[in-house]
């Protein structure tokens, strides 16, 4: 057509290039060089922005260096570099560019300070940037003040956030959102609600982010229902906030409400599906969770690692190994094998479904393992009564570089020792936990230790652990002790433990039943009958046991 491209053409075309159009962006870059437009600052700035947007940091830096050598940089160029580094979470590089900008005699602008302070990984550097913004008289700029709020909020400095917020002459919805989210992340829910109400009184309309922050953090069903009604009235129906609303109802065990909202979402994304599947899992409705996963696949939405880990957890809870194997095949077919979290979930699924060999095969095939991986295989050995193998696995874990046992590790291996009767190994491991790794024993650890000693007839030692422990006679430890008394026919100690349990658990009928069995085993038939009668006298009933086996 005879019309030549100019700097505006190139700048516009480059601004349209995203990761999917990176090759086209590189083509435009080559045309820019050939056409001699690399000397125009606006084109250079567009190139830098385009490369950062596509995650090509090295290319962006090369363009900047060439522009710097050619003298075609301006303050926008530096702002583009600072913002780009910030978007890539390279805060040190962003701050160094900020310093270079000032050395190059380019004064920082509001945009500069917003990028620098929003990305600060060092509080001291952030304070320096804040001091300079104040000197330059930019403190009255809402965007700069919001960046200060974001920075201090990221470091948990609630007092500083409050102080800056109160001093702001003008606040927008972003200012209020930062204040509300800061209070919520510090578990100051009541103050966050009051800030939200004050925001409304000052005539600032909340947005999806405001409601999303409140929904994520609130422990009050009343607040969730209030926000739900406000969303309906205001017409704020973006999928992001609806997903959070679904999760909030799931968290409060209101699955009917959650599913109703989920069903009404016209264009569901993967987060929508993950939210409802997670809700069914946590609320004990695994079959519905599997149904929704099937619906997700029918909707031709590709699940991610989190989706698949949720379904594997459902399969573990139901002992549904056939479904678990199908998920395993899906993982292999769709190149999810390298995901450590899915390897861990598969180990757990096979172990809980009774296939120790399956768990071992998955563990052996894992290219990368973390602490959870080792915990899962140790737990698998424990569940299948393979105490010696669990201890050997624990020892191998200790010698693996970059892996450190945590509280869950010791709970699993102590449980394995308990069920296998490995008293010496268990005692040694408990000592290692405290003295070598400096882990303060929890109720679970003490319960495992009491169970280990009690199962193997060391009732006096188990009693000493309970009496001398800083946690006192916790119910979990008492139950371990009570079971040991039943196994070894220790009526005297059994009576004492039963009294402690009845005080803590308000006449739990299981205590009477087990105590009656201990009395009967000791030949105290009359006392056994009297204990049984107490169940009726107190108006309690023992729930019958049940088993569920999938074939």
Image (cartoon, rainbow, N blue to C red):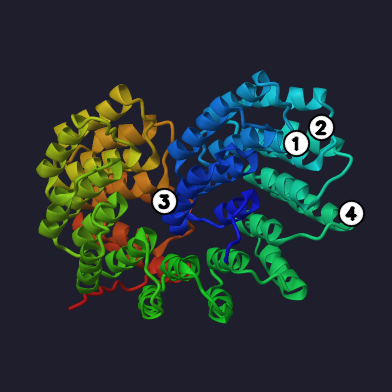
Label 1: few (<14), some (14–19) or many (≥20) C-alpha neighbours in 10 Å: some
Tag 4, which secondary structure? loop
Q: Mark 2 or mark 3, which is nearer the start of the sequence?
A: 2
Residue 203 shown left or right of residue 396 in the figure = right
Q: Quick check: 239 above or below 181? A: below
Label 2: few (<14), some (14–19) or many (≥20) C-alpha neighbours in 10 Å: some
Image spot of residue 65 (x, y percent) = 51, 29
Inspect this view and state whether residue 494 appears: no
CB within 8 Å, label 3 to label 2: no
The label shown at residue 255 is none
Q: Earlier in the sequence, mark 3 or mark 4?
A: 4
Q: Which residue is drawn at 81% across and 22% down?
A: 135
Pick whichever of labels 2 and 1 is earlier in the sequence: 1
Report which residue position mark 3 lands on: 501
Name the residue beneath numbered marker 4: 202
Which class describes the residues within 10 Å of circle 4: few (<14), some (14-19), or many (20+)?
few
CB under 8 Å between discs 3 and 4: no
> Disc 1 to disc 4, how far (Cα)?
26 Å
Inter-mark Cα distance, 1 to 3: 65 Å
- Vertical comparison of 245 with 114: above or below: below
**Nearer mark to the viewer, of 1 and 4:** 1
On the image, which quarter does residue 128 sit in? top right
Q: Which mark is residue 110?
A: 1
Whole-Å distance between the Cαs marked 3 and 4? 55 Å
Q: In which quarter of the image is the C terminus?
A: bottom left
Element at label 1: helix
Instruction: Tell me the SS state at disc 2.
Output: loop
């Amino acid at each position: 057509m005879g019309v030549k491209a100019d700097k505006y053409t190139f700048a516009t075309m480059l601004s349209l290039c995203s990761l999917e159009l990176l090759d086209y962006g590189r083509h435009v870059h080559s045309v820019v060089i050939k056409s001699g437009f690399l000397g125009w600052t606006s084109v250079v700035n567009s190139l830098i922005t385009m490369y950062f947007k596509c995650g090509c940091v090295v290319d962006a830096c090369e363009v900047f260096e060439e522009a710097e050598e050619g003298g075609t940089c301006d303050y926008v160029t530096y702002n583009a570099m600072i913002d780009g580094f910030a978007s890539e979470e390279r805060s040190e590089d962003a701050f160094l560019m900020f310093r270079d900008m000032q050395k190059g005699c380019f004064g920082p602008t509001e945009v500069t300070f917003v990028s620098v302070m929003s990305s600060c990984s060092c509080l001291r550097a952030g304070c320096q940037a804040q001091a300079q913004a104040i000197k330059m008289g930019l403190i009255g700029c809402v965007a700069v003040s919001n960046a200060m709020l974001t920075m201090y909020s990221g470091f948990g400095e609630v007092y500083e956030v409050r102080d800056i917020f109160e001093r702001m002459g003008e606040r927008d919805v972003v200012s209020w959102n930062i204040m509300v989210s800061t209070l919520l992340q510090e578990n100051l829910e009541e103050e966050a609600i009051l800030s939200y109400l004050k925001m409304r009184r000052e005539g600032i309309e909340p947005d999806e982010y405001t409601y999303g922050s409140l929904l994520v953090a609130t422990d009050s069903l009343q607040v969730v229902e209030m926000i739900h009604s406000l969303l309906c009235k205001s017409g704020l129906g973006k999928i992001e906030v609806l997903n959070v609303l679904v999760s909030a109802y799931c968290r409060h065990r209101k699955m009917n409400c959650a599913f109703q909202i989920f069903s009404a979402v016209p264009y569901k994304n993967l987060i929508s599906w993950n939210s409802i599947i997670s809700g069914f899992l946590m609320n004990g409705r695994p079959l519905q969770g599997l149904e929704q996963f099937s619906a997700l696949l029918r909707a031709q939405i590709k699940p991610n690692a989190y989706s698949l880990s949720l379904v594997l957890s459902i399969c573990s809870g139901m002992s549904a190994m056939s479904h678990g194997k199908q998920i395993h095949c899906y993982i292999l077919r769709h190149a999810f094998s390298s995901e450590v979290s899915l390897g861990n979930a598969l180990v757990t699924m096979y172990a809980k479904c009774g296939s120790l060999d399956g768990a071992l095969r998955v563990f052996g095939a894992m290219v990368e393992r973390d602490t959870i991986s080792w915990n899962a295989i140790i737990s698998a050995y424990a569940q299948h009564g393979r105490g010696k193998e669990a201890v050997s696995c624990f020892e191998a874990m200790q010698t693996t570089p970059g892996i450190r046992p945590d509280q869950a590790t010791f709970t699993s291996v102590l449980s394995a020792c308990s069920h296998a009767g490995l008293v010496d190994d268990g005692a040694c491991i408990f000592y290692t936990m405290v003295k070598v790794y400096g882990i303060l024993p929890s109720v679970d650890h003490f319960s495992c230790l009491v169970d280990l000693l009690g199962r193997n007839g060391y009732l006096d030692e188990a009693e000493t652990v309970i009496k001398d422990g800083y946690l006192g006679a916790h119910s979990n430890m008492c139950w371990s002790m009570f079971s040991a008394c039943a196994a070894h026919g220790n009526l005297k100690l059994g009576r004492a433990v039963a009294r402690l349990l009845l005080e803590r658990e308000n006449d739990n009928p299981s205590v009477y039943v087990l105590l009656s069995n201990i009395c009967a085993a000791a030949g105290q038939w009359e006392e056994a009958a009297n204990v049984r009668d107490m169940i009726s006298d107190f108006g309690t009933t023992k729930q019958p046991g049940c088993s569920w086996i999938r074939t």
